[in-house]
Image: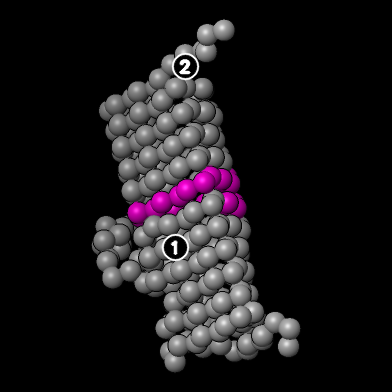
Amino acid sequence: MNQQVLPDLRLSGVNGAAGGVYGNVVLEGVSKIHGDVKTKTFRVDGMLTLEGGLVAETVDGNGKLKVNGALQSFSLSLDGMLTIGGKLEGESCTVNGGLTVKADSEVERFTGEGFFKVEGLLSAGTLDFNMQGQCKAQEIGVENLKVRQSGSKVWGKLFGGVIPMLKAELVTDSIEGNQLDLEYTQAKVVRGDVVILGPGCHIGLVEYGTRLSVHPDAVVEREMKRGE
């Protein structure tokens, strides 16, 4: 039986199309898609409004993108800004710019530079991020976490006139993980096996298993070693 050959979708300029199932999607310019999209590759260079959800093996976004539904992708790479109205699921998410997820985010590897906002749970095997603006999640669950203030101010300069660039720090109610290496983090509760708190941290409660290291410029209101 021959495998069905799916049509590609290619748009340029100011254009629109219906959602559907495609082989590959390439959008250049200002695009609007009406409905859900399922495809192998999804590439955007410009501005996109997708009035539905997106399922793709790979997503490569360059510009300003808005997906009103959920986004599911094995590999997501972003240069610019992306707003997702539903849940984000995938294996790899690389951000160079700004990411907003209005639900939970569940990816195995979350890396990048810029800023993010996850209105639900941010779950990842590895989270490694250089912050240029405020990074915020309701809760964070990870195996390994490392956050730093970025020395670069590229995104702050580009979007400072459009988006108020808040202080480059991580803000969350709680962080749970194994290896936690934090700087400039505001959290009510941090729980991990090895917890390293660098400058700019203000933590309400730290629960640790093996080791806790606190920088002189970090504040911990209460600490507790597991098993004691």
Range drawn in magenta: 86-106
Report how many numbered discs are placed on residues in the image: 2
Amino acid under disc 1 = Asp
Name, please, the residue furthest toward the front: 210
Local secondary structure at mark 2: loop
Q: Is residue 169 left or right of residue 205?
A: left
Q: Magenta includes 104?
A: yes
Amino acid under disc 2 = Leu
- Residue 119 visible somewhere in the drawing: no
- Residue 199 visible somewhere in the drawing: yes
Between the residue at mark 2 and the residue at mark 1, the CA separation in whole angstroms equals: 37 Å
Residue at image point 56% right, 84% down? 212
Q: Earlier in the sequence, mark 2 or mark 1?
A: 2
Residue at image point 44% right, 37% down? 58
- Tell me the residue that label 2 is attached to: 6
Residue at image point 34% right, 39% down? 47
Dot 2: within a 10 Å radius of its alpha carbon, few (fewer than 14), some, or many (20 or more) residues?
Answer: few
Q: Position of residue 185 (x, y in %)?
A: 48, 75
Between residue 200 and residue 209, name the one nearer to us.
Answer: 209
77 vs 125: above or below = above
Q: Position of residue 16 (x, y in %)?
A: 39, 25
158 vs 34: above or below = below
218 vs 124: above or below = below
Quadrant housing the C terminus:
bottom right
Local secondary structure at mark 1: strand
Q: Magenta includes 117?
A: no
Between residue 3 and residue 41, name the one nearer to us.
Answer: 3
Q: Could you say which disc has been placed on residue 128 in the image?
A: 1
Quadrant housing the N terminus:
top right
202 vs 43: above or below = below
Between residue 133 and residue 57, name the one nearer to us.
Answer: 57
